[in-house]
């Protein structure tokens, strides 16, 4: 698990640490307030905990997956359900339903992954 401190390529992302849990994708959590991106864990909740330990607010954290080839963001994480309910989307489950949050996640991904 790591919070990115510099931008990386998709190829570098696939090998960001010694442990890569999946061959063609990686789990990520973004802090949409601070613009942080944590990557590479078995569970989104592990990345959420890492960001919380660094001072992030739980309501600012969204989980998603990044597929390497072709590059794609998949908005699917259990940690998103409470954020969806708080944003007024009570039945939207594991995706990221708030359009503003999705747009912010895309900005953060573009900032950290080239």
Image (spheres, rainbow, N blue to C red):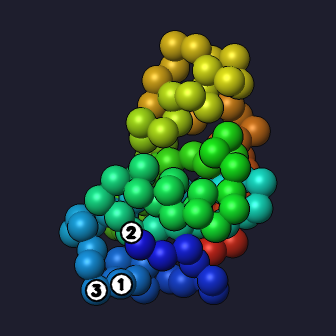
Instruction: Pick whichever of labels 3 and 2 is earlier in the sequence.
Output: 3
Other residues around mark 1 within 10 Å, as few (<14) / some (14–19) / many (≥20): few
Quadrant holding the C terminus? bottom right
For the residues labelled 3 and 1, the Cα–Cα distance comes to 4 Å
Instruction: Pick whichever of labels 2 and 1 is earlier in the sequence.
Output: 1
For the residues labelled 3 and 2, the Cα–Cα distance comes to 10 Å
Residue located at (47% from left, 60% from top): 47
Residue 8 drawn at (x, y percent): 54, 84
What residue does disc 1 label?
17
Residue 112 drawn at (x, y percent): 62, 74
* In-image side of 54 versus 104 (left or right): left
Residue located at (60% from left, 57% from top): 52
Return the mark for residue 40: 2
Q: Report the front residue among 105 and 86.
A: 86
Above or below, comparing residue 84 to residue 114 in the picture = above
Other residues around mark 3 within 10 Å, as few (<14) / some (14–19) / many (≥20): few
Label 3 close to label 1 by CB (< 8 Å): yes
Residue 78 drawn at (x, y percent): 42, 36
What residue does disc 3 label?
18
Element carrying mark 1 = loop
- Is residue 26 visible to us here? yes
Residue located at (61% from left, 20% from top): 85
Return the mark for residue 60: none
Element carrying mark 2 = loop
* In-image side of 37 versus 108 (left or right): left
Residue located at (50% from left, 56% from top): 49
């Amino acid at each position: 698990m790591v919070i990115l401190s510099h931008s990386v390529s998709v190829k570098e992302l696939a090998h960001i640490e010694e442990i890569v849990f999946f061959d063609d994708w990686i789990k990520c959590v973004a802090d949409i307030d601070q613009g942080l991106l944590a990557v590479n864990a078995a569970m989104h909740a592990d990345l959420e905990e890492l960001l919380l330990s660094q001072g992030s607010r739980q309501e600012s954290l969204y989980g998603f997956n990044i597929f390497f080839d072709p590059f794609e963001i998949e908005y699917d994480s259990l940690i998103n359900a409470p954020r969806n309910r708080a944003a007024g989307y009570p039945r939207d489950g594991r995706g990221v339903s708030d359009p503003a949050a999705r747009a912010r996640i895309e900005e953060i991904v573009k900032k950290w992954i080239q």
